[in-house]
Amino acid sequence: MRSICLGVLLISATAAADAPRTRDSIARVVAGRSDTLRACYEQARKGAPTLEGTFVYTLTIGATGRVTKPVAKAPTKTTTALDACVTKELAKLVFEPGAETVINYPFVFKPEETKPAKPTSAEDPVDPTLVKMFNDATKLAQAGKHKEALAAFRAVLETQRAKKLAVIPRFTSTVRLQLSYELIDLGKLAEAEKELGLVDLATLGKPKQYDYYFTLGNVLGARAS
């Protein structure tokens, strides 16, 4: 389980074969500035309300782990404010020392979708059986047992459908988001993209919505590279 897509970075990178930096370690560092990067987008939208989409930034990680030359890959007049803010934040990142690495990092920025949430009543809870299954699957994911975790998260959805157990949309979307993480960790990008397409984004809270966009951007960037 990740707070913001940790361990699922999928990027185009060039580095020495023995470089100690992994996609996981790079993703963790970038995700650590997720709030400020999102703030860059929200601030840029004040001057460009229709601004949204996938934005790719290229940065070089030097031997000391410091970032140099962060630039927008396809800058436009509309993205000037966003690019300036994002590259400033990327320049503050510090990674593990290692061979010089050049990465192309995609971010998906979109306005948050808002929809009145349906109150959860005493008559509409998530069945305890499903909650336990989800928690057990999460423990497997945290232990790095991605194949087993994938099967366990799928079992949550299959059990709910087969037994028609009580569930709420937000729970189902959360399970599908976790499923996508495990598929990515197993290198099954096409399946991950399909699973993300089944997520009802409007049922998720703000942190999970950002997780969704962050994950989708990584998958699309990887499949395009």
Image: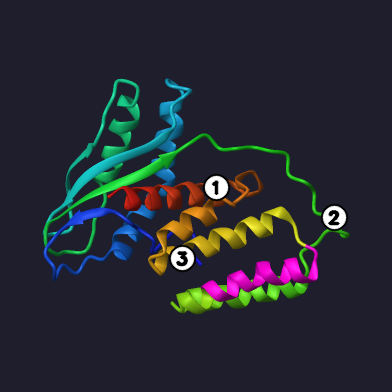
Q: Quadrant of residue 41?
A: top left
Residue 3 vertical placement versus 127 (above, below): above
**Which mark is drawn over residue 42?**
none
Q: Is residue 32 visible?
A: no
Q: Residues within 10 Å of mark 1 (few under 14, many from 20)?
A: many
* Residue drawn at point x = 27 percent, y = 45 percent: 90
| Viewer-side label of 1, 3 | 3
In screen coordinates, is 192 left or right of 21?
Answer: right
Q: Nearer the viewer, residue 67 or 10?
A: 10
Q: Quadrant of residue 88?
A: top left
- Magenta span: chief secondary structure: helix
**Which mark is drawn over residue 183?**
3
Q: Residues within 10 Å of mark 3 (few under 14, many from 20)?
A: many
Measured in 3D between alpha carbons, the distance from the residue under mark 1 to the one under mark 3, in whole angstroms, is: 19 Å
Q: Residue 23: percent from the left, percent from the top? A: 29, 62
Q: Is residue 97 visible?
A: yes
Mark 1 is on which residue type?
Answer: Gln
Q: Residue 32: percent from the left, percent from the top? A: 38, 54
Q: The magenta stretch spans which residues?
A: 150-166
| Viewer-side label of 2, 3 | 3
Q: Nearer the viewer, residue 41 or 13?
A: 13
Q: Secondary structure at mark 3?
A: helix
Q: For mark 2, what is the residue?
A: 121
Mark 2 is on which residue type?
Answer: Ser
